[in-house]
Image: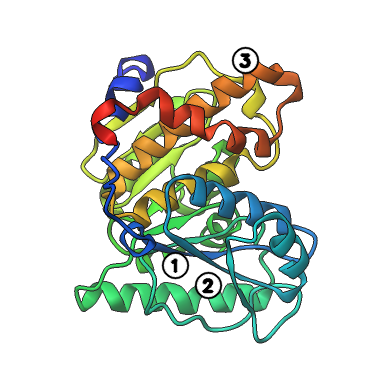
């Protein structure tokens, strides 16, 4: 199948996926996301991801971060609950208990220190054990979590079903090299992503100027866009991971969360480019335009 012939991720699809938000509700209804992110010098990625998740309608967010993140989080995002790592002030190094969360996002700005890789393996094992007991926790892996998968591809066997990976083309190439899969062209890379998604029963959001979502059933969806160069900026992928994680925590199925998150990210970026011009866009600007993205697809029966 030619890349251009895939079903489109567009406003119509997003309108069908977005759920009504009940008037009689409280924060517990809209989920509790655990974000494991941030490394000394890379806390901005964690903050961007957290803020995007909360802007997606999430009820509550806990960020597991090094203590060096305290000031930036408390100043920039007072809505976040902070859980400081007990073993390191610089990076993720400790075991995390996963009992109280609706979904989890791992990776933005995380780093790949040896202790972090150990902690990552421990959490992945916990998630796999939960799946075996019928207590599946929705999971998004982004950025350095993907790099750790590429360095230790045996961890792929730990991925629970319905996990969402959100690689850009470079991260996808590294994963394909580790698995000895074709990656020389974009079509080959997309075919490999589709094969991984179906074989592992996961979903892959392959980020590019025309993002594709490969589902665990073999379906591939393509974002209906000619591209937006304003998205070629540091942190835009962290925003997308947060959006998808926030939707997962609210109970959206993984496929729906991936598709809706990709569209909302795109719609916010389009609004941002119109306001600021692509040359001037920052990842935080995309977050500021998320209300307009939601407004564009919310009909009167959602209130």
**The N terminus lies in quadrant:** top left
- Residue 5 against residue 289 in the figure, above or below: above
- Residues at discs 1 and 2 in contact (Cβ within 8 Å): yes
Q: Which mark is residue 120?
A: 2
- Residue drawn at the location 21% of the way across and 42% of the way down: 217
Give the label, 2 or 3, closer to the camera: 3
Residue 6 at x, y percent in the picture: 30, 21
Secondary structure, mark 2, is helix
In the image, is 90 to the left or to the right of 179? right
Asked whether 298 or 104 is in front, the reply is: 298
Q: Is residue 163 visible?
A: yes
Earlier in the chain: of badge 2 and badge 3, it is 2
Q: CA distance from mark 1 to mark 2?
A: 10 Å
Mark 1 vs mark 2: which is more N-terminal? Answer: 2
Where is residue 146? Give x, y as percent: 53, 55
Q: At x 71% / y 27%, what residue is drawn?
A: 281
Q: Looking at the rendering, in which quadrant would you find the C terminus?
A: top left
Residue displayed at 46% across by 62% down: 60
List the residue tagged with mark 1. 155
- At 64% from the left and 57% from the top, the residue drawn is 46
What residue is disc 3 on? Answer: 274
Asked which secondary structure carries label 3, the reply is: helix
Q: Which mark is residue 247?
A: none
Q: What is the distance, in whole Å, between disc 2 and disc 3 at their CAs?
A: 40 Å
Give the class, few, some or many, for how many residues have Cα within 10 Å of label 2's Cα (few <14, many ≥20).
many
Image coordinates for residue 197, horizontal then vertical, percent? 32, 46
- Mark 2 and 3 residues: CB-CB less than 8 Å, in contact? no
Quick check: marks 1 and 3 in contact, CB under 8 Å? no
């Amino acid at each position: 199948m030619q890349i251009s012939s895939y079903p489109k991720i567009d406003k119509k699809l997003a309108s069908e996926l977005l759920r009504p938000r009940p008037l009689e509700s409280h924060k517990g209804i809209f989920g509790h996301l655990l974000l494991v992110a941030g490394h000394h010098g890379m806390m901005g990625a964690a903050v961007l991801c957290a803020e995007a998740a909360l802007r997606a309608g999430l009820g509550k967010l806990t960020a597991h971060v090094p203590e060096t993140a305290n000031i930036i989080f408390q100043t920039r995002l007072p809505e976040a609950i902070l859980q400081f790592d007990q073993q390191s002030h610089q990076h993720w190094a400790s075991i995390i208990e996963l009992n109280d969360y609706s979904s989890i996002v791992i990776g933005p700005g995380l780093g790949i220190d040896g202790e972090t890789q150990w902690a990552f393996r421990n959490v992945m094992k916990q998630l796999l054990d939960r799946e075996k007991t019928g207590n599946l926790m929705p999971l998004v892996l982004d950025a350095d979590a993907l790099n750790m998968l590429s360095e230790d591809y045996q961890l792929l066997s730990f991925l629970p079903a319905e996990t969402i990976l959100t690689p850009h083309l470079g991260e996808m190439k590294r994963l394909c090299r580790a698995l000895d899969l074709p990656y020389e062209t974009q079509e080959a890379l997309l075919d490999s992503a589709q094969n991984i998604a179906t074989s592992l029963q996961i979903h892959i959001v392959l980020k590019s100027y025309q993002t594709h979502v490969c589902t665990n059933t073999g379906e591939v969806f393509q974002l209906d866009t000619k591209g937006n160069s304003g998205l070629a900026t540091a942190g835009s992928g962290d925003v997308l991971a947060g959006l998808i994680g926030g939707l997962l925590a609210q109970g959206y199925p993984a496929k729906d969360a991936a598709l809706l998150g990709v569209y909302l990210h795109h719609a916010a970026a389009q609004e941002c480019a119109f306001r600021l011009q692509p040359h001037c866009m920052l990842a935080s600007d995309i977050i500021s335009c998320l209300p307009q993205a939601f407004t564009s697809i919310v009909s009167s029966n959602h209130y």
